[in-house]
Amino acid sequence: MDPQVSWLPAAAVVVPTLTSALIVAARRRPDVRDGILVTGAVVTFAIVASIVPRVVAGEILTTPLGQLLPGAELHLTADGMGMVFAALASLLWVLAGFYAIGYMRGDRAGNQTRFYAFYSLCLATAFGVAFAGDLLTFFIAYELLTVTTYPLVAHNGDGKALTAGRTYLGYLLSGGALVLLGIVIVYATTGELSFAAGGFVAGSMSPAMTGFVFALFAVGFGTKAGLMPLHAWLPGAMVAPTPVSALLHAVAVVKGGVFAVGRAVGFVFGPAALTGIPAQTLLATAAAITIVTASVIALRQDHLKRRLAYSTIAHLAYIVLGFALLTPASYEGSLMHIVNHGALKITLFFAAGAIHIAAHKDYVSQLDGIGRRMPFTMTAFAVAAYGLAGLPPVGGFLSKWHLVLGAYDGGHTAFAAVMAFSGLFTAAYLFPIVYRAFFRPPPADHPHGEASSLMVAPLCITAGLAVLLGLGDLSGMYAVMADVAGAVTGGAR
């Protein structure tokens, strides 16, 4: 179906940007400012929700942005893949908005106006990444996502936060420079930048040049996706307030990285260009090594957010591995895991933040009996831990099933085994937390209850969403993922 001109993809970017400006304007009236944050999130969700049924029906919506280079039209396009990312980000932003207000008030944090303004800008750039219809628009939004998130990472303003912020910028902007070089080569070689399912570079580049450009994209995007050894910025960024950690891991930044890998593999290169060159296998191998290594490191982390950070690194590698294998089921599984992991991981980080605010505890070794004092929070944590381990009926099971099936269908038995058995690692570093919370007696000192309802309600909703994602196809999104995977790989699951 030919793309239809629509203002909706642009509106999904403009509304959060306008929300940021209004937040600054209302800086002297905190209640109004906080209301603007939530209202902007709800309006953006409504815009994206209006796109979903049209994309499910097979439509492609596009907003032309003009021409920056000869023959290279910039445009925002809501296709199946972009809709998946945007739907996840818009829904979780609504919940994260309420949660952030509860957290920042509970923590008595300073500079809240600046925090909320950049929080909104970060989401605006994430929607730009989701709906970018060509490599140049994608690159601009992708780099703006890095820049707008830096003030959130460095928000606390102390030495650790500033060091983490500099590390964050150093890694991600360096990766962006490699991506830019790859885009220049693609444009010079093909004269084309618009994404196309199945890729558009085949026949225009030699195998050697294809492998080189693929490596540029893999390293550049792999930096934001947290592939080892390009991951060091991510655990360090855990010094940021927990709403930022949730944003980094579940909604925007690292999800933007793995989404970028999927776009590059499926919509720039494709099977025709990658057949016969080793780059694809090397990326898959790097992802498999990251899964195992990050999981082992997670086992050794006592700091709760750092344990969750290494868990994220491992699960992002699942997504990269599925994209790299380029089979119908593995590509579909990666798209599914973007959504399922987002719901599961934001629940875990929301719970960590609630524990920090209500109990002032940040370490796993401090969590004995906490489930008896924070039953809603820790039940949601337990549901998310169960789903992240890949057990039914939570959504994580479906995405891991497709990933393992895709690897096996493609003849990659070793990769299938890594993904199948890595669920044991996830259980090993998350289930002991649940055991401590519910089956060990709490200490007699420091009695406490749940955090505020602004924090507890969102984490309960995200845990429920994770279960719903395991029970059926919400709004036809899984069907869209299957269609995208089929179009990219040229096969049907």
Image (tube, rainbow, N blue to C red):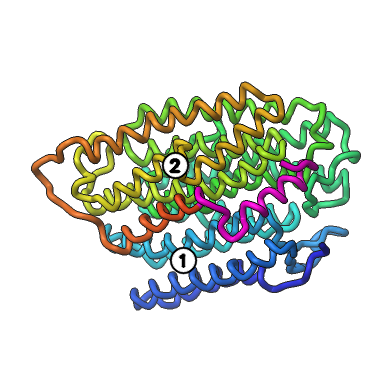
Give the class, few, some or many, for how many residues have Cα within 10 Å of label 2's Cα (few <14, many ≥20): many
Q: Where is residue 62 in the image (x, y as percent from the top left)?
A: 74, 66
Q: Magenta stretch?
A: 469-493
Give the class, few, some or many, for how many residues have Cα within 10 Å of label 1's Cα (few <14, many ≥20): many
Q: Position of residue 231 (x, y in %)?
A: 52, 35
Check disc 1 and report its element: helix, strand or loop: helix
In the picture, the quarter occupied by the N terminus is bottom right
Q: Where is residue 386 in the image (x, y as percent from the top left)?
A: 40, 40
Q: Which mark is residue 387?
A: 2
Residue depicted at 79% across the width and 33% down the height: 274
Front residue (pair 121, 350)? 350
Label located before the other in sequence (2 or 1):
1
Residue depicted at 19% across the width and 41% down the height: 369
Q: Which residue lies under the disc numbered 1?
A: 117
Q: What residue type is labelled 2?
A: Gly
Decide if residue 76 is in sight here.
no
Decide if residue 165 is in sight here.
yes
Q: Position of residue 89 (x, y in %)?
A: 54, 58
Q: Residue furthest left?
A: 444
Residue depicted at 43% across the width and 32% down the height: 426
- Is residue 347 left or right of 49 when viewed as pictured? left
Please name the predominant secondary structure of the magenta segment in the image. Answer: helix
**CA–CA distance in space, label 2 to label 1:** 33 Å
In the picture, the quarter occupied by the C terminus is top right
